[in-house]
Image (cartoon, rainbow, N blue to C red):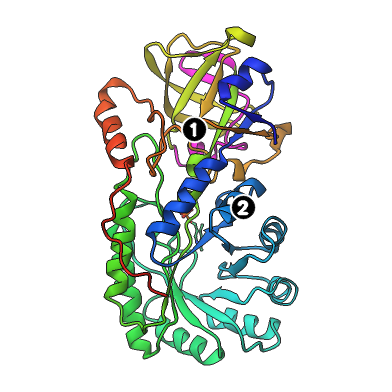
Amino acid sequence: MHTYHTPLDLVRERSPERPVAFARPDAVAVAARWFQDKFQGDVFYAVKANPSPWVIEALVKNGVNSFDVASIREIELVAQSAPGARMAFMHPVKSRKAISEAYHRFGVKTFALDTHEELGKILEATGGAQDLTLIVRLAVVAEGASYSLAGKFGVDLHEAPALLLAARRATQGKMGVSFHVGSQCMRPTAYQAAMAQAQRAIVRAGVMVDIVDVGGGFPSIYPGMIPPDMGDYVDSIQRGFAEMSVHEETELWAEPGRALVAEASSVLTKVELKKGDALYLNDGSYGTLFDAAHMKWPFPVKLYRGEGDDAHEVEGPLKPFRFYGPTCDSIDHMPGPFWLPDDIREGDYIEIGMLGAYGVAMSTNFNGFGEAEIVEVKDAPMASMFGLAGRVIRLPREEQAEERKVVRLSRPKGAAGKKRRRR
Ligand SMILES: *Cc1c(COP(=O)(O)O)cnc(C)c1O
């Protein structure tokens, strides 16, 4: 991977015609170390958030050597980029072939399930293996998520006790529970509340669990979505865990995806046309901007203009713009608002920040677009939950109060909440 000091250096060196994705392995490193340090349990990275080999490698280098995978392709990716890493197959619905290959070919022993039927499939496809770790995915009622994951997966709490009991009886290995409070969870207490629900199901089943897996959902910062301090999330989990009747050896797991990688990538796009407040770009909803289109999330932006040594960042008075992507599909529209200098014009470059999670990972080749080159950069992300940002999200004046809040929130908390690591 080619390295530039900053995105502007790349614009200076060669005005790129196609979108460029920036990789910041240092930002992954800081997030990984934060979770290692502050989360009192095992961290499994949810590979789907960003399966790039440079991400997997940066995580492993910084102590995250466990991965939440959902397909054989993801298992192969992890096996290639992180040989010997621990994997947990956390998709509650798997093909028999995938289960069998995961177990026999890749040595995966941990499987999630949310039905008796899936439990049967796992037992049969592994040839009645006795060394399985079985995780029962619960459907919890959670508030505060920007991206709900309820509905598709998880056993209802009133049906959970029977499934917990069946899973407990099915393995000589470990058995646990998991849930997902929903992605970009803005409320730390959602975890403690979900753990209380898990606790009730466990008590009703009359079983002991060896693992409590609190899933993903840890937030990142986007304009208009400024979450509480990340420390509040691990504190809520710690409180929830302390209130559960688990045994001394019960392990606490988490599966962060977004929080580990969101800051680590941004994308450089080129303005092909300006039509009023609409900017037509060479990247869009079929490329790296899925959430900007379908969730209508406004992402932070910077503007670069000029070629060679003349290339520079443009500041100027800001105006709200919306984006259209390069495909002929009219849903390829990102409403924003994206705050950019009002004299923005064709040929300018827009760097869109905070696209490390569910951004580069979602790109398709629809309509002949979508291929983004990846280069490494050394500058800070546009905003940070981990005190990394050299500058914070650029917001219009009326939202400057929010901007100050970002600065405050992104400062790492002291040693508060540091307790004995419980395994
Ligand atoms: C997507 C997913 C995650 C990661 O969620 P984030 O919101 O990105 O942290 C974790 N666990 C499971 C089972 C998932 O499907």
Q: Which residue is mark 2?
A: 56
Amino acid type, label 1:
Gly
Say whether mark 2 is within 8 Å of ligand 1.
no
Structural crowding at the residue carrying mark 1, measured as other residues with C-alpha within 10 Å and reported as few (<14), some (14–19) or many (≥20):
many
Amino acid type, label 2:
Ile
Looking at the image, tell me whether mark 1 or mark 2 is earlier in sequence order.
2
Q: Residue at x 38, y 73 (%)?
A: 422
The quarter of the rendered structure image containing the C terminus is bottom left
**Does the magenta portion include 292?**
yes
**Does the magenta portion include 334?**
no
Which is more toward the observer, 60 or 311?
60
Q: Residue at x 57, y 62 (%)?
A: 65
Vertical relation: 275 (above or below) 250: above
Q: Is residue 143 left or right of residue 391?
A: left
Magenta stretch, residue numbers:
272-296
The quarter of the rendered structure image containing the N terminus is top right
Q: Which residue is mark 1?
A: 353
Q: Percent from the top left, x then y, of residue 28?
A: 52, 46
Q: Is residue 148 visible?
A: no
Q: Percent from the top left, x then y, of residue 32?
A: 49, 52
Q: Helix, strand, or loop for circle 2?
A: helix
